């Protein structure tokens, strides 16, 4: 048994336990060193992932290939930067407890297991490790009723989704006789597909759609995004989304690849619904975190468009889209976390008024992210959309493509509104507080990536291509 | 391949961007930053202009091929290249863009006092995108430049515009975005069908007629919004009225040409059948645009709005000329695009001169300006006459050629265009009379100063061009001739091939 294959996960698990032990030492100011240790562990894990061999381990429960490598690097990047975003905020919001980084570490471990899962059992274990950690950090600001509400809501709905997923998995097991992805694929390609498997697949899909917050399983998103502390929201919007989309792709393309005629319709509807809801529901939002929640629902819709067409161009489009999405979102949330005046965190769109004058650098980066999310070239977001639309057009999914076009125009309205507030409105309440260097670094780094992506698109697209080849091969 | 021996098109395209970057780096006191930003922007745009004059000098008008070609692999696995080049159709629009930008910067020298640095950055970025769009020979590259224009223009209207600037900026952005996203779908379909996005290759690709129909519709929506054609023109008056003077100049001078350029560059050569089938619709919309917007212009109380509507009418003449598929019609359309770029830009500058002094665009607010500002009144008159297409000014040769071309196709269409010219004379002269002549009813007007040396510097090149284009149009028509002849020959060939196949 080749257990060393899972070295990155093992490293994360062991370092999580060790850091937990260190954290228990009752001393003040443990947050920062613990967070740094966790970031170090994440970086080390990323290095290990890049050097990882390919193959399966743990009796076929675990698989490492180019696809999992792509997704894991993205997840680790999102998690590490997500933690960096929390450094200063948590100190100021009195949330600087050492459990926070450790929980994020375990959540990341859960995501890595999800991505590498090659069996419905390991899939569920990874998913639950992620979910349990997320339930806790959603309610991390426990004295704040809104945060507690967010945590509880997420827990109740998440438990329901997990139940659906488990039920679907048991149906699949019952009708196909195995939980292993490879053997499932063999069983399904033999042609003898019972209705039970399809029903099971739909339940599994429902459970996973909840995790990616695709319509019609999106209800939790706005409330949780609004209630959770902003760095937690930033984390929610990035790494777990990638993990869930990657898992969804893995499950659908791998074991259920032969049922694509069935799941394409489901994904089609989820994609169209998410794009439409994301475009319309965000228009009226005043709270910027809520707005970002709807925006993320919309983005998931575009990403799912690539999955709905069920071909390699589409899958590659999904990966490119998610990579760009993570970068844009981290940058946007860096700006949101920096919104603080007189020591008080701000969450309304109006609070950005006049930012173009009071803080030109931050306004510039925010404008870059907003135009990019609206899909205006030459920014990165445009290329994300370009590849999924290309796939949709190639596969003849004209209706979906046109829905995507129309919702892009509608969605661009609320992204533009943020630019409008920053540049066209005058600052009435004065400048924001000086922002910490950590946020500036994240903002500028992700901003430059978004702005200059057009210079080196081949690198990311090539990597996505290799990842898809491993998945669909 | 490259006649100049170095990547001159990329240099012209990206030099303004480099200037914008330098301006962004400037730090210090507001006053110092503003002064440095102005001078850097002016010098950058002047150097760009000087470089682009090399194009004028080294361009070989005897061939229809693309010249100064540059090609670098960009997305090899998709067959997308960074491919730049100009032919007789596009080269003069590059020059128009590089000419108008320094004039705009000069025209905003004093009128823009807030956030000067951002303003200059926005204009240089805008110039870069406009030039890139006219040079691009790859569809994806073209689309990127075409869309990216929206960002600086949105900010220019929204930050430095008038009272209803937010509404106008949003309307401008969303209208154009909706159109161009449909074009994106069409580009993707073309890409998938032909396996390449290389424009010269695509021009030689024959698309099946059924596909041409849908592609044409998608392109049509996008370009019609940009032109703008009736009935999707309503964003233009709002955008023009609210934009700052220089914004209006670029909007009328260059951005409106992007739609017509799209028709000539893509719709005609790539989709000959659909173009021929849709020509009657275009004629109808163009004639409606010419007549209807001219009548609307007659009723305007706001100078900028009047000129904005006159732009829609002029662009109606342009689209009409393009879809005649005749040498005269197409050359006339291209010439009108150039002359309109110069003349309407100049007219907006004329309005800007008054607005800077009185801060009103209302026509009734003025009267008797000719007595107070004689030099200004003379210049304003020249451009008014050019706009009415008086022989000897820039407006005349283009419109004459379009009407000749239209007459070959359908006399009634020519009649519509001619009617537009008559109405054009009516509203422009009416505007001029109300502003320049009559009694001086407002005492504060008596204190107005005539043009400053800076304003003379802004108007001088435009006056020169207006007269040159009117008196000796050949030096401009020369550039189009080979390319237009080639375009028409290919169009005819495609149609007759289909006719033969049909028999």
Image (cartoon, rainbow, N blue to C red):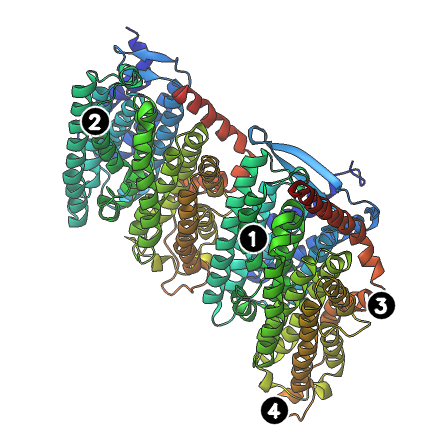
Of residues A55 and A386, the one nearer the viewer is A386
Q: In which quarter of the image is residue A42?
A: top left
Q: In this view, does B1 lie above or below A119?
A: below
Disc 4 and disc 2: Cα gap in Å? 86 Å
Task: Please state which of the two labelled residues, at mark 2 or mark 3, is closer to the viewer.
Answer: 2
Give the quarter of the figure containing the C terminus of chain B. top right
Q: Earlier in the sequence, mark 1 or mark 3?
A: 1
Task: Please state which of the two labelled residues, at mark 4 or mark 2, is closer to the viewer.
Answer: 2
* Mark 2 lies on residue: A195
Task: Please state which of the two labelled residues, at mark 1 or mark 2, is closer to the viewer.
Answer: 2
Q: Earlier in the sequence, mark 3 or mark 4?
A: 4
Give the quarter of the figure containing the N terminus of chain B. top right
Disc 1 and disc 2: Cα gap in Å? 69 Å
Left or right? Give the position of A402 relative to A153.
right
Q: Earlier in the sequence, mark 1 or mark 4?
A: 1
Residue B455: mark: none
Count all numbered tags in the image, as a single digit: 4
Disc 1 and disc 4: Cα gap in Å? 44 Å
Classify 10 Å Cα crowding around label 1: few (below 14), some (14-19), many (20 and above): few
* Mark 3 lies on residue: B471
Q: In this view, does A461 lie above or below B317?
A: above
The chain letter under disc 4 is B
Residue A246 image point, x, y percent: 34, 29
Q: Are marks 1 and 3 on the same chain?
A: yes
* Mark 4 lies on residue: B442
Mark 2 residue element: helix
* Mark 1 lies on residue: B27
Disc 1 and disc 3: Cα gap in Å? 48 Å
Residue A404 image point, x, y percent: 41, 46
Q: Quadrant of residue A395?
A: top left
Mark 1 residue element: loop
């Amino acid at each position: 048994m080749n257990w060393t294959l899972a070295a990155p996960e093992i490293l994360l698990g062991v370092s999580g336990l060790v850091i937990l032990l260190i954290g228990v030492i009752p001393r003040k100011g443990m947050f920062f060193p613990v967070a740094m240790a966790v970031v170090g562990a994440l970086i080390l894990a990323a290095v290990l992932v890049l050097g990882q061999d390919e193959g399966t381990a743990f009796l076929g429960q675990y698989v490492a290939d180019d696809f999992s490598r792509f997704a894991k690097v993205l997840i680790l990047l999102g998690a590490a930067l997500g933690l960096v975003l929390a450094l200063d905020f948590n100190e100021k919001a009195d949330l600087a407890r050492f459990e926070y980084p450790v929980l994020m570490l375990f959540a990341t471990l859960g995501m890595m297991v999800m991505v590498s899962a090659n069996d419905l059992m390991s899939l569920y274990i990874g998913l639950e490790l992620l979910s349990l950690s997320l339930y806790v950090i959603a309610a991390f600001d426990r004295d704040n009723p809104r945060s507690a509400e967010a945590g509880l809501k997420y827990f109740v709905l998440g438990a329901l989704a997990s139940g659906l997923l488990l039920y679907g998995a048991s149906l699949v097991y019952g009708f196909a006789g195995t939980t292993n992805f490879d053997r499932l694929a063999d069983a399904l390609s033999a042609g003898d597909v019972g209705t039970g498997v399809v029903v099971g697949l739909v339940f599994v899909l429902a459970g996973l759609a909840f995790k990616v917050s695709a319509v019609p399983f999106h209800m939790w998103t706005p409330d949780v995004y609004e209630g959770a502390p902003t760095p937690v929201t930033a984390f929610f919007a990035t790494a777990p989304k990638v993990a869930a989309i990657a898992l969804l792709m893995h499950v659908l393309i791998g074991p259920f690849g032969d049922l694509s005629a069935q799941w394409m319709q489901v994904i089609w509807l989820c994609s169209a619904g998410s794009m439409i809801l994301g475009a319309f529901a965000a228009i009226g939002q005043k709270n910027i975190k809520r707005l970002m929640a709807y925006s993320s629902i919309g983005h998931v819709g575009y990403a799912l468009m690539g999955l709905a067409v069920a071909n390699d161009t589409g899958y590659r489009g999904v990966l490119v889209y998610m990579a760009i999405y993570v970068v844009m979102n981290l940058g946007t949330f860096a700006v949101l976390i920096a919104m603080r005046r007189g020591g008080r965190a701000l969450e309304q769109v109006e609070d950005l008024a006049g930012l173009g004058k009071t803080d030109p650098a931050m306004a510039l980066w925010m404008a870059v992210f907003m135009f990019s999310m609206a899909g205006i070239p030459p920014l990165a977001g445009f290329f994300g959309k370009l590849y999924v639309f290309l796939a949709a057009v190639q596969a003849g999914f004209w209706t979906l493509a046109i829905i995507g076009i129309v919702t892009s125009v509608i969605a661009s309205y609320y992204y533009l509104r943020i630019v409008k507030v920053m540049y066209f409105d005058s600052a009435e309440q004065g400048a924001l507080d000086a922002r910490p260097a950590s946020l500036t670094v994240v903002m500028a780094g992700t901003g430059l990536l978004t702005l200059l992506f057009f210079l080196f698109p081949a690198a990311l697209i090539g990597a996505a291509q290799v990842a898809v080849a491993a998945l669909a091969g | 391949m490259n006649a100049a021996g170095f990547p001159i098109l990329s240099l012209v395209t990206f030099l303004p961007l480099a200037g914008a970057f330098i301006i962004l780096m400037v730090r210090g006191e507001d006053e110092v930053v503003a002064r440095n930003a102005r001078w850097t922007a002016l010098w950058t745009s002047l150097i760009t202009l000087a470089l682009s004059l090399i194009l004028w000098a080294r361009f070989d008008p005897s061939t229809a091929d693309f010249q100064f070609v540059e090609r670098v692999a960009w997305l090899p696995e998709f067959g997308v290249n960074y491919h730049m080049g100009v032919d007789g159709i596009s080269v003069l629009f590059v020059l128009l863009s590089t000419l108008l930008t320094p004039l705009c910067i000069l025209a905003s020298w004093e009128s823009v006092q807030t956030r000067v640095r951002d303003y200059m950055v926005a204009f240089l970025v805008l110039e870069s995108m406009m030039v890139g769009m006219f040079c691009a020979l790859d569809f994806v590259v073209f689309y990127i430049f075409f869309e990216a224009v929206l960002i600086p223009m949105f900010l220019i209207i929204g930050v430095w515009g008038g009272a209803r600037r937010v509404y106008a900026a949003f309307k401008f952005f969303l209208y154009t975005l909706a159109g161009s996203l449909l074009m994106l779908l069409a580009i993707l379909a073309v890409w998938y069908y032909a396996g390449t996005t290389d424009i010269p290759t695509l021009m030689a690709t024959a698309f099946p007629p059924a596909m041409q129909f849908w592609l044409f519709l998608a392109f049509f929506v996008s370009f019609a919004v940009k032109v703008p054609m009736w009935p999707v023109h309503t964003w233009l008056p709002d955008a023009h009225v609210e934009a700052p003077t220089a914004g209006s100049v670029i909007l009328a001078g260059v951005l409106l040409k992007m739609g017509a350029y799209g028709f000539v560059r893509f719709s005609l050569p790539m989709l000959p059948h659909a173009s021929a089938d849709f020509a009657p619709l275009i004629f109808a919309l163009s004639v409606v645009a010419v007549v209807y917007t001219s009548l609307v212009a007659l009723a305007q109380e706001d100078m900028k709005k009047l000129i904005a509507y006159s732009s829609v009418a002029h662009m109606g003449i342009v689209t009409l000329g393009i879809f005649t598929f005749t040498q005269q019609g197409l050359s006339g359309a291209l010439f009108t695009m150039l002359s309109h770029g110069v003349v309407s830009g100049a007219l907006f500058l004329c309005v800007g001169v008054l607005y800077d002094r009185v801060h009103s665009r209302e026509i009734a607010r003025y009267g008797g300006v000719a007595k107070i500002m004689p030099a200004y009144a003379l210049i304003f008159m020249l451009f008014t006459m050019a706009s009415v297409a008086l022989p000897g000014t820039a407006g005349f040769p283009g419109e004459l050629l379009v009407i000749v071309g239209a007459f070959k196709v359908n006399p009634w269409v020519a009649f519509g265009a001619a009617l537009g010219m008559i109405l054009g004379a009516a509203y422009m002269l009416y505007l001029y009379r109300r502003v320049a002549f009559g009694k001086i009813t407002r005492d504060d007007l008596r204190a107005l100063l005539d043009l400053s040396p800076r304003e003379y510097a802004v108007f001088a090149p435009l006056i020169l061009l207006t007269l040159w284009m009117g008196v000796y149009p050949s030096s401009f028509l020369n550039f189009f001739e080979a390319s237009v002849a080639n375009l028409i020959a290919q169009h005819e060939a495609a149609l007759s091939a289909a006719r033969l196949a049909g028999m």
